[in-house]
Amino acid sequence: MATRAEESAAAAARRSLEANVRVTPGMPLPIGAAGGASVLDVSVLVPAKDEAANLPGLLEQMATAFQGTDVTFEVIVIDDGSVDGSWAVLGQLEPQYPFLVRVRHRRCRGISDALRTGYLVSRGRVLVFYPADLQYKPEDLPTLVSPILSGWVDMVTGTKKGKYEKAFVSTVYNWLSRRLFSVPVRDLNGVKAYRREVMEVLPIRPDWHRYMIVVAAAEGYSVAEVPIPLYPRNAGTSKFTRSRIIVGMLDMLSVWFELRFGRKPLLLFGGLGGALFAIGLITGIIALALRFLPPHIGFRPLLNLVETCVIVGSVLVVGGLLGEQIAVQRAELREVRRRLDAAATDDISR
């Protein structure tokens, strides 16, 4: 029997989903949900923001993607607050494609949130992030997922083949990422396939879908890459803007800090604080020697340096100790999030 705490958690998850997500009434049961929903091999998650012109062609190609294979699949299109009629187009296409599951955000929440919503309603053992703009063709899906379904790798990223816009930005981004994170792949920002359990270790942060490979590799999951052709956008306009370059760089630093010190912040802040204390101690000894040993010179800037080092060092050490307490709370919240996700899938299925 569910405890009162579990019932409260389920109710909270339901209210959150009702406020932000709309799902189709006939949606198949999520994996692990009450009622014994069947597990599929692959769930293709397609975030779509104002992609009405691309959706018919995308689903037509999805229908033939796994022909000739034993792979069972579903395509979950997450309408991320579109204003161009994408939701209505999906409604018209739904009777034609039984593998289609449509989900809608009431407002634009970004790709990371869209992927998480798709994960919550999916039934696949393997999840695939595939954009709706048809720059990647669904015919390449078997190539992407076969290394995972065969059991020799946990996550696969598609390395772009062909000419494309923003190639220089992508090259710099991938070069910096390889230097910072030492990941064994050349392209972090293409289509991705990954085991379902990878989602459990990903922080819920805006735009962090770009660093799924990095976080998964840091958590011990094996990663690989396969070449995937990239084509010109079929219709619509790109959502990429120049401001996202700066956001991407800042996110990169944030991910680096999270992976290096997120669970042990005292290593950084305590280390810096200890170093400043040491500098202050050495400077204080020098100042005392100059003051009390011949020729008895008093040098006030040294005193100011001692004060600065001691004060700033104390602040850093205290900040590190507080960070340790926050890290403990975050570990506990991860477990709460895992339970809420399980409760959320139960709520969606009813």
Image: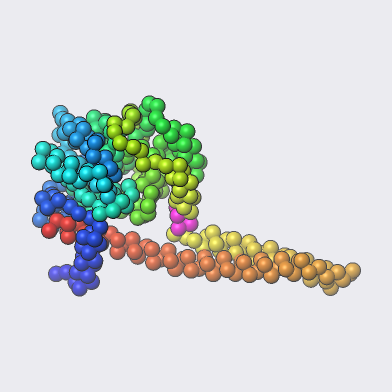
Quick check: is 332 in the magenta stretch? Answer: no
Q: Position of residue 281 (x, y in %)?
A: 70, 67
Q: Position of residue 161 (x, y in %)?
A: 37, 28
| Quarter of the figure that contains the C terminus | bottom left
Q: Please report the residue visible at 32 percent of the width from the left and 52 percent of the height from the top.
A: 109
Vertical placement of residue 337 versus 2, above or below: above
In the rendered image, which quarter is residue 165 located in? top left
Q: Nearer the viewer, residue 19 or 27?
A: 19
In the rendered structure, the answer to whether residue 259 lies left or right of residue 306 reads left
Residue found at the very far top of the displayed protein: 162
In the rendered structure, the answer to whether residue 281 lies left or right of residue 41 reads right
| Quarter of the figure that contains the N terminus | bottom left
Q: Please report the residue visible at 45 percent of the width from the left and 42 percent of the height from the top.
A: 242
Q: Which span of residues is magenta-colored? A: 258-262
Q: Nearer the viewer, residue 274 or 299?
A: 299
Q: Position of residue 196 (x, y in %)?
A: 26, 47
Q: Please report the residue visible at 57 percent of the width from the left and 65 percent of the height from the top.
A: 316
Residue found at the very far right of the displayed protein: 295
Which colour scheme appears in the figure? rainbow
Residue found at the very far front of the displayed protein: 84
In the rendered image, which quarter is residue 132 located in? top left
- Asked whether residue 108 is in view, the answer is yes
* Magenta span: chief secondary structure: helix
Q: Nearer the viewer, residue 93 or 149?
A: 93
Q: Position of residue 310 (x, y in %)?
A: 65, 69
Q: Please report the residue visible at 30 percent of the width from the left and 36 percent of the height from the top.
A: 236
- Asked whether residue 116 is in view, the answer is no
In the rendered image, which quarter is residue 147 located in? top left
Vertical placement of residue 168 versus 1, above or below: above
Vertical placement of residue 229 versus 113, above or below: above
In the rendered structure, the answer to whether residue 99 lies left or right of residue 291 reads left
Numbered-mark total: 0
